Image: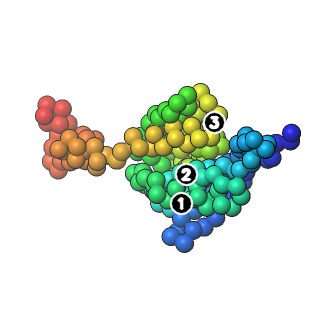
Amino acid sequence: MAREPREGGRGGREREQGDDLVDKLVTINRVAKVVKGGRRFAFAALVVVGDQKGRVGYGAGKAREVPEAIRKATERAKRTMIRVPMKEGRTLHHDTFGHYGAGKVVVRAAEAGTGIIAGGPMRAVFESLGVNDVVAKSLGTRNPHNMIKATFAALEKASSPRHVASRRGKKAAELFGKREQGQTEAEVTNG
C-alpha cells in the first residue's frame, strides 16, 4: 500500500483567514475504521493557526473528506489560541522547555537575523506565531501531534519581564538591576 505524501514542513499549505489569521496545515493522515463489511477510510488533519503577532493555536479534525477535516481542525485551532509574549516582536524573552508524552522540546531565544531553526511541526507554530528568530530542538518523538503539544507547553511557560515583575510586586527595571538616576554601583549592590 503506497503512502500518500504528507503536506507540511517548509512548503506546507498556508491560507489567509478573514481575521488576519494564517493557518498552516501540518499533516494529513488517512485513518481506517474496521467494520463488518471492510474498512471505512477517513482523514485526520492537524492545523496551526496564528495572527503572526503573538497569538497561536492548534487543532485536529477528522472527517471522511480532506477539506472537511481541515475545516474542523481550523475551527478547533481558533478556539485554542494562546497569547505568547515576544521580545521586540521577533523572539521569545527567555529559553524554555516543554514536554507532552514522549515528546520533549527545547526552545531558545535567538539573536536578530538567526531565523527560525526548528524542525517540521515546530516551524509551523513559530511561523504562525510571528517569531522571526528562534532555535528549537525536539527530542524523544517525531509524532507531529506530540511535538506541537510539547511546543505549546513550552510557549505557555514563556513570560515577559513585566509579568514576572508584577508577580513579585516589583518594577521591571528592578529585575534587571538598573540603576536609578544618581545611584552609584556600590549603592545598588548594598541595597
Q: Position of residue 157 (x, y in %)?
A: 39, 40
Residue at left offset 25%, top offset 41%: 175
Classify the position of the N terminus by image quarter: top right
Q: Is residue 56 left or right of residue 191?
A: right
Residue indicated by mark 2:
59
Q: Nearer the viewer, residue 177 or 1?
A: 1
Tags 3 and 1 touching, CB below 8 Å = no
Q: Residue at x 48, y 49 (%)?
A: 91
| Element at label 1 | helix
Tell me the residue that label 3 is attached to: 143
Count all numbered tags in the image, as a single digit: 3
Please tell me the numbered disc located at residue 109.
none
Name which residue type carries label 3.
Answer: Asn
Q: Are marks 3 and 2 in contact (CB under 8 Å)?
A: no
Specify whether 130 is left or right of 31: left
Q: Are marks 1 and 2 in contact (CB under 8 Å)?
A: yes
Instruction: Check disc 1 and report the residue beneath it.
Output: 75
Residue at image location 62% in from the left, 40% down from the top: 144
The part of the image, by quadrant, that contains residue 24 is: bottom right
Q: Nearer the viewer, mark 3 or mark 1?
A: 1
Q: Nearer the viewer, residue 132 or 51?
A: 51
Q: Amino acid at mark 2?
A: Gly
x%, y% of residue 71? 61, 61
- Pick whichever of labels 1 and 2 is earlier in the sequence: 2
Residue furthest right in the image: 1
Find residue 98 and report its horizontal and vertical position in percent: 47, 35
Horizontally, is 123 left or right of 95 in the view?
Answer: right
Q: Earlier in the sequence, mark 3 or mark 1?
A: 1
